[in-house]
Structure formats: C-alpha cells, structure tokens
Amino acid sequence: MSSTQSSAAVLPPFSPTQVRLLLNAERLFATKGIGATSLREIATAAGTSNNNAVQYHFGSKAALLNAIYFHRIACLEPIRSEMLARAEERGVAAAPAVLLQILCLPHVSLAAEDGSHPYAGFLVQYVTRHWHESLTEVARETQRVAPTLHDLVARLAAKVEGTSDTLARARVMLCNLMFLNALLRWDNIGRHASDLSLKAVLDDALTAARAALCAPSNEDATAPDLFADLFPGLLSQPAASLTHCEAVGAPEPRVTTN
C-alpha cells in the first residue's frame, strides 16, 4: 500500500493480518501512549516478520489510528443498532439518558482478556490529541461505516439547547469522554476497591453525562469575566473549528512513526 494514501482510506472489512496489527496497536497505544509507540514495535507485537508491516497495510501512523477507529465503530455498530431498535420499539428513543446509554455502554463489551478496556484508552487519546480538523474524510466515512453512530451523535446534539451545532457536538464528545474516563478509572483503580462495582461507577458516569448534555448553555454568561485577568487570552482566543464524528478533539502533535 502506498504511503501517500489518504489516512482515511483503509476501511473495514480488514484481513486477519490487518486485524492482528490493529488489535496489537490498540493495546500498545492504550498502555504506552500513541506518541511513545513505534510502528516497528507494533509489527513485532503482532508476530509479523516484516518490520514495515504497518506501513505496508495502512500506509502511515495517522492511517493506522483512523483504521483502529473505523474497525471499532464497525464492531460496535450492530449492538448500537439493536439497542436503538429496542428503544424505538418501547417508545423511549427520544430520552437523552437512553441515547447516552446507546452511545456509551457498548464500549464495555470491548474488554481484553484481563478485563481491561484498551479501546477506551486508545479512543481518549485519539479524540483529544490525534483527531485533526482537516480530516473531514474520516467524518464522512464514519457516516458510511457506522450510520447508527452518526445518527446517535446528531440526535444527542439536538438535545443541547441554546448553542451552535458545533458546540452541541462538542458537548456530546464531552459526555462520551466522561464515560470513557470513568471506565478507564475502573480498569486502573476502581476494580481493586471493595466498595465499588462497575455498574455503580458507570451508572454514575451516565448520570453526570446526562446532566452535562442537558445543562443550559450560557446560564451565567458573566461568570468567565470574573477571572479573565488571571488567564490572559482565555476570552480572546478564536473558537476552534471542530469536526464531528464519534468525538472531536485537538490538533495532532508530533508522534513517533518508526
């Protein structure tokens, strides 16, 4: 595969070799960090004899990140579709709490053998550091690969009142990140606590996410001015142009590529 190929061009279905590379990359990215993991390390972990296997199959590190995302949203699409159909049959598909459950709960099903959730660890990094606003093709392909996910984001964004569509979708991203971070905290701390259960932790995260989703926008527009002098530039920075998908994030920093 040419290294000049678009970072969004490698889409499901993937070959067994590609899936092996994706899963090992996801695990290493979640545990070591995306920037600290090299493509050669991923190839070695996947048991390939070709140190350039990732470049051959995906073209670049950016394309690999997108491929992990596409692979996982495709994996989660059937369960999200089933959940949405069940909610519609029972007449509760318009409820914000139900829509958030459909968006977030499927992440729990992507557990490793040790019970941890490496995709959650990958996704938090991906959407906050490696999702660039210029990758509009990724957003377009998301609608094709995972139409239920695309529909869910739109439905949830519509629940946010009094703000732009861009900020509404950013609010949905924030809710998703709240759930993902609660899941990761459970992986690393919560499951060792005798007085906590995964259900209690995630129920609390979903409750907080619903409150965040439905909170009035600009309830007190004067509040930021109280501390503006302490944070020069806070109110003068132009709003970033955000692109939506499953989530949105900040521009991509330099990462290791070999």
Image: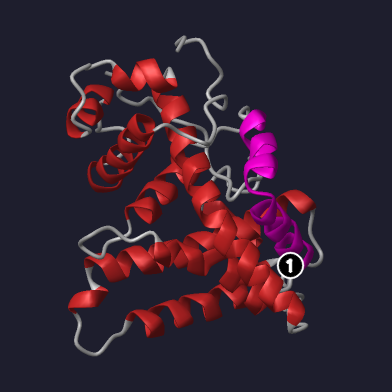
Residue sitting at x 56%, y 63% = 79
Q: Quadrant of the C terminus?
A: top left
Neighbor class of circle 1 (other Cα within 10 Å; few <14, some 14-19, many 20+) is some
In this view, the residue in front, 104 or 78, is 78
What segment is highlighted magenta in the picture?
136-160
Tell me, yes or no, whether the highlighted magenta stretch contains residue 182.
Answer: no
Above or below residue 227? Residue 64 is: above
Residue 60 visible in image: yes
Residue 257 visible in image: no
Three-letter code for the amino acid on which mark 1 is drawn: Ser
| Total marks in image | 1
The residue under label 1 is 217
**Res 236 quadrant in image:** top right
Image coordinates for residue 128, horizontal then vertical, percent: 47, 45
Magenta stretch, main secondary structure class = helix
Q: Quadrant of the N terminus?
A: top left
- The answer to whether 18 appears left or right of 66 in the picture is left
Residue sitting at x 33%, y 59% = 117
In this view, the residue in front, 61 or 233, is 61
